[in-house]
Amino acid sequence: MADTLTVTDNRTGKTYEVPITDGAIRALDLRQVRTGPDDFGLLAYDPAFMNTASTRSAITFIDGDRGVLWYRGYPIEQLAERSTYLEVAYLLIHGELPTEKALADWTWQVTHHTWVHENVKKFMDGFHHDAHPMSMLISAVAALSTFYPDARVNRDAGHRALQVHRLIAKMPTLTAFAYRHTLGRPCVYPDNDLSYAGNFLNMVFRTADAKYAPPPALERALDVLFILHADHEQNCSTNAMRSVASSGVDPYSAVAAAAAALYGPLHGGANEAVLKMLRSIGSPARIPDFIRQVKTGEARLMGFGHRVYKNYDPRARIIKGVADAVFAATQPSPLLPVALELERIALQDDYFVTRKLYPNVDFYSGLIYDAMGFPVEMFPALFAIPRTAGWLAQWLEMLGDPEQKIARPRQVYTGPDRRDFVPMERRA
Ligand code: CMC
């Protein structure tokens, strides 16, 4: 049996044989399907990349029907239970789990790049008091490229590694500075004695104490949430990262673009939208009416559904366990009963069952962040911090892939045919 696809063009009666590799045909192989010498050749039309693989990748594997997620072959459940965010970030970037020494070096590097230039504080100060932290983060990370102009031109592997350390290290600092700005509080500088998650909590929440001790349950919970959000193969923001970086731009600008893609309510903004939705529902008694609105298209059940998962998102399962640990250490969220009941009803309802709509990673993460004391405006940034490792792993993979070029889709033109310019006085 040949690994090929035979296609007959009924316009011409010609037959073509196209190779199948790893379950895919090359869209460029369709170009030979032409009606004549003036025909450009057949295009694959795929708005929103519903069935197009844009790359070969060895980083993250998802089986949406079985609810499976692996980073570099390791199941997400094992990583969430036994690893740390920084170890997982190393795994994503380097492809293997670190040795003890490699992890110590990596941790040292990330820890010692957490500080930002003092001028960053000055432009943070320029933002309006009610600026959204994610908008500030996007702007600030783009602005980092002005501090490291050599990142634009230097393509050396060691130099790239330096940008990776800087970006993973500085995203929490920029986020925390943005948050403190919204409160009108002074920035808290990084504390190198703390873990990645612990230091972030320090920069966000420290008040008068000289030394901040992160609550262990919250520190671990945040670290697990960071692990769960670290990568998710070719999603909207990762595609933005690859697409923008394919032009050869520096990684700070590309991460800003990826973060901008993440900000949208259908992607990383969904956890913010979930919390707002739960607040607007308010009590379990109002759920049936809300479900009715979803079914008539007046509302959307945020935190449900996924382009790839047509089963329970494995991250959502782990997050439920994290929620229990956090609520044991804080106040139980008054919105938890609403979320649990909403999930229970939706999982039995034909509308959601037939469309295979299950809770995704964002359904419970917002409740946890809320219980930890983060305002909803911080949620997208809490996603961007850990996803930076994934974006950078994908960036490095793209740079090393000889098949990749500047990303440039084709279009099917549907506009007017050629016509002559109409002077103003003759326009209708
Ligand atoms: N509530 C109600 N109906 C929904 C929902 C939802 N959350 N999600 C999908 N549907 C319906 C949709 O209306 C469509 O119905 P019909 O066939 O009758 O037209 C059907 O289910 C298929 O949905 P789709 O919009 O074609 O699916 P998609 O793959 O384009 O969208 C999605 C995926 C995540 C954008 C969508 O499910 C959604 O908007 N969910 C809510 C937002 C959300 O939670 N986003 C976070 C995603 S996970 C974190 C991340 O990776 O960013």
Image: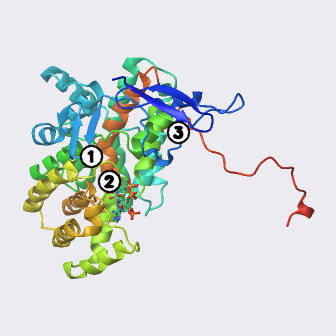
- Residue 174, horizontal then vertical, whole percent: 37, 45
Contact check, label 2 and label 3, Cβ < 8 Å = no
Contact check, label 1 and label 2, Cβ < 8 Å = yes
Mark 1 residue crowding within 10 angstroms, few (<14) / some (14–19) / many (20+): some
Q: Nearer the viewer, residue 21 or 181?
A: 21
- Residue 135, horizontal then vertical, whole percent: 45, 53
Whether label 2 lies within 8 Å of ligand 1 gets the answer yes
Give the quarter of the image for residue 106: top left
Q: In the image, what residue occupies the spot 21% across and 43% down?
A: 68
Reply above or below: 137 against 194.
Answer: below
Reply above or below: 222 against 252.
Answer: below
Q: Nearer the viewer, mark 2 or mark 3?
A: 3
Amino acid type, mark 2 = His
Mark closest to the chain's N terminus, 1 or 2: 1
Whether label 3 lies within 8 Å of ligand 1 gets the answer no
C-alpha separation, residue under disc 2 versus residue under disc 3: 24 Å
Give the quarter of the image for residue 346: bottom left
Q: Secondary structure at mark 1?
A: loop
Q: Nearer the viewer, residue 193 or 410?
A: 410
Q: Secondary structure at mark 2?
A: loop
Rendered image coloring scheme: rainbow
Looking at the rendered structure, which numbered label has been put on residue 306? 2
Residue 330 visible in the picture: yes
Residue 141 visible in the picture: no
Amino acid type, mark 1 = Gly
Amino acid type, mark 3 = Ala
Mark 3 residue crowding within 10 angstroms, few (<14) / some (14–19) / many (20+): some
Looking at the rendered structure, which numbered label has been put on residue 64? 1
Reply above or below: 354 against 124.
Answer: below
Reply above or below: 255 against 380.
Answer: above
Looking at the rendered structure, which numbered label has been put on residue 262? none
